[in-house]
Image: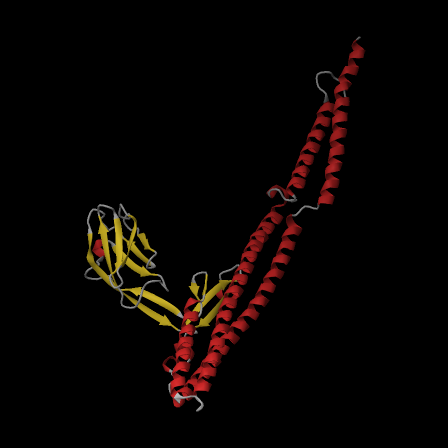
Amino acid sequence: MAMTIASNYSANVAYRYLKDSDNDATRSLAKLSAGTRVLSGRDDAASLAIGKRLESETAALRQASVNAGQAGSMLQIADGALSSISDVLTRMKTLATQAASDQVSDAERVYLNDEFTSLRSEIDRIAGDTEFNGQKLINGSQTVTAGTIGTDIEAADGFGAITFDNNAAGVSNGDSFSIEYDTTTNRFTVTNTTTGVAQTSEQVTAAPAAGATQDVRFDEFGLTLTLTSDFDPATAITANNTFDATVANSASTTFTYKIGTGTTAAEDDLAFTLDSAAVASLSAGLAADTLSTRAAAETAIDNVAAAIDEVNDRRAGIGANQNRLEFAAANLASSIENSEAARSELLDLDIASEMTAFTSKQILMQAGVSMLAQANQMPQNLLKLLS
């Protein structure tokens, strides 16, 4: 190669390799700082895609594990309440056995009956008061529906639907409600005319667009009014717009917990059905039993025994579900551990290996800087030939 002053090929080559070493060292330093070997798709596109998918799966599995823990807590609360009811029933059977014996007079049976009746009321109180995050567990479920939009409340007024929440508070079967709209305040008022309780909505100043709807919420009653584009905020709605509520009760409540990361119910959901532990659901005759006579006490003994069997059956079911949850939680923990390990294998950085590579690149950078300095000195040697 000719020796020239106009261009310095050696310096250009040295600079190119120095720049490559600097880029490699910078990328290595970034990986060390981030703790991951795949900073972007250019590093390893396949590993990035798989690793991120595993990362999202692991995050979902962790939440599923929390869900399983919450399900266990819910079942534990229900079991604790049933344990208390079992204790109450044990005392009631003791009282009934005492009243069924002739060493007790009718006057004394009155005292025993007073306690028996109070304890029976306590069972219903426990069943109605046992909740988890506001949801009643062993009191059955309640479905509330609104009367059909009809003569007074018309679709032409802009009412698309009237919907109650299930287990809506403050609503009883046959309660009558009225709806008003005040054009001065631009607010709806719903009144339970049976109880006199009323609630006013937030301001509603415009109708929904054509084809759209707008929900107006009344949390006091668990009620939602759905408005259509036919609603006219310039026209008052008077209190003769009425409808009734219909309450239907069932003897059980089903709670569904997501313990998987998919949407297949059989694989990703666990459903727990908790039967009502109210007196009427435990024994057909227990609600009317008294200890006023020896014969009545004999009947009460059988009915209390039947109720105890029902409580034990419910507790056995809860216990089975708790055991199932423990296995589900253990499986989730194993899945989280293995998914995290797989993700780590793809994305996490081997610090020792990368630090060795970074040190090598630093040495190459230092050598490149030295060689570039030497290459820049080479044209100056040619000046000696000109002197």
Which of the two residues, 204 or 276, is positioned nearer the viewer here? Answer: 276
Residue name at image x 54 percent, y 59 percent: 66
Q: Position of residue 345 (x, y in %)?
A: 66, 51
State the colouring used for the structure image. secondary structure
Classify 100 as above or below 264: below
Is residue 291 in sight in this rendering?
no
In the rendered image, which quarter is residue 44 located in?
Answer: top right
In the rendered image, which quarter is residue 292 located in?
Answer: bottom left
Q: Position of residue 163 (x, y in %)?
A: 31, 60
Classify 220 as above or below 252: above
Which of the two residues, 374 or 127, is positioned nearer the viewer here? Answer: 127
Which of the two residues, 375 or 197, is positioned nearer the viewer here? Answer: 197
Q: Where is residue 123 in the image (x, y as percent from the top left)?
A: 43, 74
Residue name at image x 77 percent, y 26 percent: 370
Residue name at image x 52 percent, y 64 percent: 73
Tell whether 373 sits left or right of 110.
right
Is residue 30 in sight in this rendering?
yes
Which of the two residues, 352 or 51, is positioned nearer the viewer here? Answer: 352
Tell whether 252 sits left or right of 11.
left
- Number of marks present in the image shown: 0
Quadrant of the drawing holding the N terminus = top right
Tell whether 350 sits left or right of 72.
right
Residue name at image x 40 percent, y 74 percent: 121
Quadrant of the drawing holding the C terminus = top right
Q: Position of residue 49 (x, y in %)?
A: 58, 49
Classify 295 as above or below 58: below
Q: Which residue lies furthest to the bottom in this view?
A: 102
